[in-house]
Amino acid sequence: MPIKMVMETPEQRVFMNVTANQCPGCPENLAARLVMHVVFDVLGDQKPVVFGQGCGIGRDFLQRSGLGTHDSGVVGMLTAMQVRGIDRPIVVIDGDGQVDLGLEDLATGFQQGYKYLHVVCDNQAHAASGSHATGSTHPMARTGVRPSGKLRHPKHFTLMLMFSGAEYVATAATSHPQDLERKIRNAVTRLPAFIQILTPCNPSWGYDDDKGIEVSRLAVNSGIWPLFEWKDGVFDRQNIPSKATVREYVAAQRRYAHLTDADIQSMEGYVKELDDMLSKLQTGFGA
């Protein structure tokens, strides 16, 4: 009797378990739910396969790979599905730590043209194992192994993948759900695609459980987490009025309690450099 793939069985257990004892008010869990709601709304008749795991995301039945191996796992799944004549979309949902460790697999999968959507819920920490820094941790943020704050600027995964074969990339935030929904709908028809969602972490960042959306909104409004997308060869920034300062953003989190005025000025300089860089991209790749 030939061995059947999971998606060839009557049960077809290809869903995420998003109730995996997350912290109260976990924005990462909220983001995973929003993503799956839109994915199944748009692709439901195509029986999408959701793959991956993360601290606040949950675990899924198909996830059996190690840290940083989700994209190589998806490439294997897509190849096996092609051999078996199965045509179903795949969506990966995981965290920034996974991407940091598996960036080579992710970039190569995109460069080779494998058609899938990868969504990252970015809490800027290995939150399930001590909250040490990832490549996306913001400068000056206190982490589990660097109490004086991270020294260097973060990696910009979206921009790296924009030049690695992606048809669509975008940043999003849990504080802006309509923008997130629109970007997911754009992404599923432009594969390979990558969306990086800012999802603050209660214990790692140091804020009250009911303040996750407020902290996310401060990040967007202060400019430290700009919203943009690369679609159909056009780079476009979402017009978000500057309604908050970097000082207000850091004041809302205990991971920045150690900052001096000079440190905050340095972070303001980073935000200015980021804004200038994105403005140049919009000028060069604008409509």
Image (cartoon, rainbow, N blue to C red):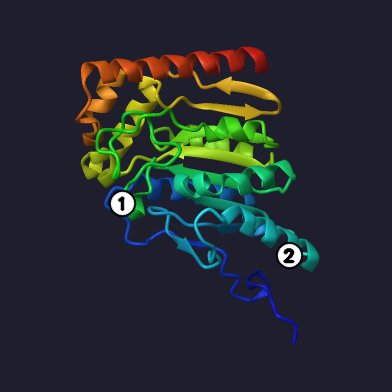
Q: Residue type at mark 1: give it.
A: Gly
Residue 181 appears left or right of 162: left
State the residue at coordinates (28%, 53%): 23
Secondary structure of the residue carrying numbered label 1: loop
Label located before the other in sequence (1 or 2): 2
Percent across and percent down for residue 153 are 43, 28
Q: What's the mark number on residue 80?
A: 2
Can you say which quadrant of the picture contains the C terminus? top right
Q: Quadrant of the N terminus?
A: bottom right
Residue at 52% x, 68% y is 61
Alpha carbon separation for disc pair 1 and 2 = 36 Å
Q: Residues within 10 Å of mark 2 (few under 14, many from 20)?
A: few
Tell me residue 212's x, y (percent). Answer: 30, 39
Per the image, the residue denoted by label 1 is 130
Res. 233 visible in picture: yes
Q: Is residue 228 above or below residue 187?
A: above
Q: Nearer the viewer, mark 1 or mark 2?
A: 1
**In front here: 36 or 269?**
269
Displayed quadrant of residue 83: bottom right
Q: Secondary structure at mark 2?
A: helix
